[in-house]
Image (cartoon, rainbow, N blue to C red):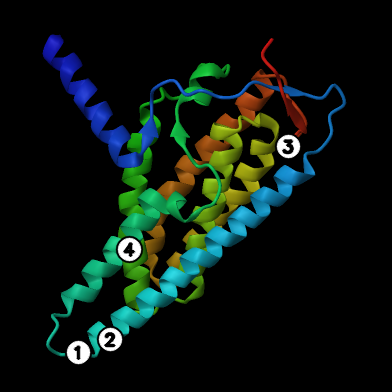
């Protein structure tokens, strides 16, 4: 039993390290919500601008990568597998650490999920980083297949929309995990990560059916995640479906 406990602890630490999940307690400043539910316009603008900036930055990386790969492919002295390796590495960074391109606070933490009321069927916290790590691998494989099918071009609609999908997912993480806006998280997860995953999967399938099939597993998981977010919102007070204006609470 002791060995099993140690092994599970090692696995959990490895998964959380790879996916950048913080399990320790984090200090958050106390906040209060106005008795009159007012929309936080500033927060909405921050989310939009942060998402647009992240998308633009990642597209810029795709542009730079395309120029680099073109130079490599045109140099007969460099093995052909080099460009494929670098492309896979790029998509691995995108899939696991896309948040490094965001200006928003995208801390991966279990604190919100641990503290809210969850439905009985909700997966345990460790399931999430494990599943996301598996999905990251599938994203890399499917994206490389699309890149190959598009003659080593990066600035193509399937990959551009893939970048958009990652960016809106990071913004959702800010809203739900970091800022704990359970109401705003509902429409964002539906019209952001979930819907964009369906669109990207469809485009991947049109480009390379194998890529679409591989990426479709992420759609299944995001469907479960969207339903879970909806149920958490319902079980925790059903606040308005938009970011509420908040004010810091001063310690006495």
Residue 233 shows up from this direction: yes
Q: State the image coordinates of residue 155 (x, y, percent, origin top left).
A: 46, 77
Q: Which mark is residue 90?
A: 4
Marks 2/4 in contact by CB < 8 Å: the verdict is no
List x then y, in percent, for residue 2.
Answer: 14, 10
Of mark 2 and mark 3, the one earlier in the sequence is: 2
- Classify residue 146 as left or right of residue 245: left
Establish if 99 lies above or below 73: above
Q: How many C-alpha atoms fall within 10 Å of the one at disc 4: few (<14), some, or many (≥20)? A: some
What is the spatial separation of the Cα atoms under label 1 and label 4, in whole angstroms?
A: 20 Å
Determine whether the residue tagged by mark 3 lies in a helix, strand or loop.
loop
In the rendered structure, the answer to whether residue 90 lies left or right of residue 5 reads right
Q: Quick check: 93 left or right of 240? A: left
Residue highlighted by disc 2: 71
Cα distance between the residues tagged 3 and 1: 52 Å
Q: First in sequence: mark 2 or mark 4? A: 2
Dot 4 falls on a residue whose secondary structure is helix
The residue identified by callout 1 is 75
């Amino acid at each position: 039993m002791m060995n099993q406990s140690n092994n599970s602890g090692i696995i959990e630490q490895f998964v959380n390290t790879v996916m950048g999940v913080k399990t320790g307690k984090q200090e958050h400043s106390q906040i209060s919500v106005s008795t009159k539910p007012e929309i936080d316009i500033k927060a909405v603008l921050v989310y939009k601008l942060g998402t647009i900036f992240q998308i633009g930055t990642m597209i810029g990386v795709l542009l730079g990568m395309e120029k680099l790969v073109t130079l490599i492919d045109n140099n007969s002295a460099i093995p052909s597998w080099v460009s494929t390796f670098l492309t896979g590495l790029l998509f691995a960074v995108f899939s696991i650490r896309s948040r490094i391109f965001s200006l928003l606070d995208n801390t991966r933490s279990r604190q919100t999920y641990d503290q809210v009321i969850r439905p009985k069927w909700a997966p345990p916290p460790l399931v999430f980083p494990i599943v996301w790590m598996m999905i990251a691998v599938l994203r890399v494989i499917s994206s490389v297949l699309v890149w190959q099918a598009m003659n080593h071009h990066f600035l193509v609609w399937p990959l551009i929309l893939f970048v958009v999908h990652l960016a809106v997912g990071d913004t959702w993480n800010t809203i739900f995990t970091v800022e704990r806006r359970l109401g705003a998280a509902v429409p964002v997860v539906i019209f952001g990560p979930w819907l964009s995953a369906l669109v990207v999967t469809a485009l991947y399938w049109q480009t390379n059916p194998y890529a679409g099939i591989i990426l479709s597993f992420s759609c299944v998981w995001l469907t479960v995640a969207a339903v879970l977010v909806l149920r958490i919102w319902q079980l925790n007070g059903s606040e308005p479906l938009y970011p509420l204006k908040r004010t810091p609470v001063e310690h006495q």
